[in-house]
Image (tube, coloured by chain):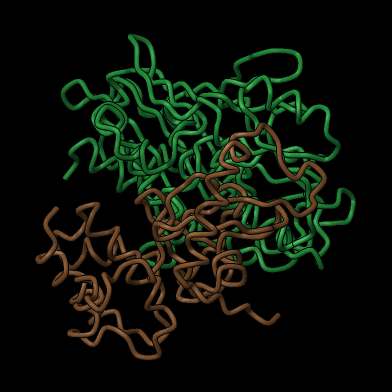
Chain colours: A brown, B green
Amino acid sequence: MTPQRSAYTRRTVLKSTAAATAVTHLTSAPAIADDGGTSEITLSVNGQRHRVAVEPRVTLLDALRERLGLTGTKKGCDRGECGACTVLVDGERIKSCLTLAVMRQGAEITTVEGLARGEELHPVQEAFIRRDAFQCGACTPGQIMSAVACINEGHTGSEAEIREWMSGNLCRCAAYQNIVAAVADAAKETPR
Amino acid sequence: MRNFGYTVARTPEDAVRIAAGTRNSTFVSGGTDLLNLMRDGAQAHDHLVDINRLDLAGIAVDRQALRIGALARMRHVAEHPLVRRESPVLSEALLASASPQVRNMAAIGGNLLQRTRCGYFRDAGSACNKRVPGSGCPAITGYNRGHAILGGSDHCIATHPSDLAVALTALDATVHLLGPDGARAVPIADFYLLPGSTPEREVALRPGELITRVDVPRTSLAAQSRYLKLRDRATFEFAVVSVAAALQMTGRTVRDARLAFGGIGTRPWRDTRAEAVLRGRPLTETTIAEAGRVLVRDAKPHNDNRFKVELVQRALARVLSELGGVR
């Protein structure tokens, strides 16, 4: 499948926002896609609302990558074991390969693309660079999203605690030592 | 994944009605097990009824029981102050399960209904009496390291993977259900079925029934409880053997005990005979060892899991020693 490159110009964003507003009532309708056919849903990602047409079987991960062109979220195992697809939904970290896009209408989704403010990286992103917390980089977006949540949850009291609460994210290069150091660093800089 | 229809239910009654009126449908809450089962072809559904918008996520308490809504997420139950204080075994079992991400997604009702990790069940290319009744059980003569040593039959020796179910079994929880014929409550001891000649029937749910709530009795016994999970990795792994134990002492004497086990039985395994060995007697290495021997008295180990007979007795000894302050 050729991923559609979405060019997010100011115009398309405004258009999709307007469209989303106009059809808000649909998201509270009692039933959609009764027959398994494609239906239009609204996903709120990194503060922007997007209309996407999906079959019920499309995971949130595939909707983000293939329909919205947000390829920062990675597809590793596609079965909830590696954590590469970790995103935040309403502030909580989840594995986007284990949930359907249609189940996430009305939720606020944050992907790795939504962390930086313009050119200014998120403190966790800065810490990963400073601590050299990645090698091939495939697991890194998931590690970073999980780390943001881990810090918000307050599970950074010790190296052992960080390791336990980051255990849903695998790194096949085994950069764990530096990942733990980066999470500990960022936790110190992040006011809770 | 084969496609399916999808409906969002608004009320529990709505959910049950939609499910009853839709062929080959099932409920979806977190979806963390269901989506993998459907990807693997271990389970197929023509329709999913999304129950996430039902008002069943609350955790309430009254004089008798802690009442956990079926849509409460694993994380929120594990972190609930009252759960941690009055039933630590529940919190510990939940925190030993899955990963932080999955614990944010997976709901309590779905956790109880997750399917076995038996590799033959999960592989649509293998025979499996649970998936295709009558097709045979390759695990009995094949690779069975993760399988049961108690409660098996000639048709199935798969274990149930839920840590929470083991803890709830130790605490005599009750599962509340709503179905086309109304509401009913089932003690967790009757909720999980032995495989016998019908391993495809794992739970006492009738067609179209929805788990709405799990009640855990509030007892002083439950406050002295813990969960020990032994696994092949330090974390993020299913149990090889696990023990949920609650112990109430009067001085050096056991006043009451509750013991349930994961990884060794074809369902969350309660052993009241082992509990009886301890009740009214001093907690010593001797009585603990006796309880362990009673537990594995009828064990039928297989080629790859003989070690579980010894391992579960050691796990039991460790939990009881720590809870009862022996040594």
Number of marks: 0
- Quadrant of the drawing holding the N terminus of chain B: bottom right
Instruction: Look at the picture and state if B307 lies above or below A124.
Output: above
Residue at the bottom extreme of this rendering: A135
B253 to the left or right of B65: left
Q: Nearer the viewer, residue A102 or B262?
A: A102
Identified at 20% across, 76% down, the residue is A182
Q: Position of residue B151 (x, y in %)?
A: 65, 42
Q: Position of residue B12 (x, y in %)?
A: 62, 23
Q: Nearer the viewer, residue B117 or B276?
A: B117
Instruction: Look at the picture and state if A82 lies above or below B306.
Output: below
| Residue B282 seen in this snapshot | no
- Quadrant of the drawing holding the C terminus of chain B: top left
Instruction: Look at the picture and state if B217 lies above or below A106.
Output: above
| Residue A71 seen in this snapshot | yes
Q: Nearer the viewer, residue B123 or A122?
A: A122
Q: Nearer the viewer, residue A153 or A120?
A: A120
Identified at 70% across, 52% down, the residue is A56
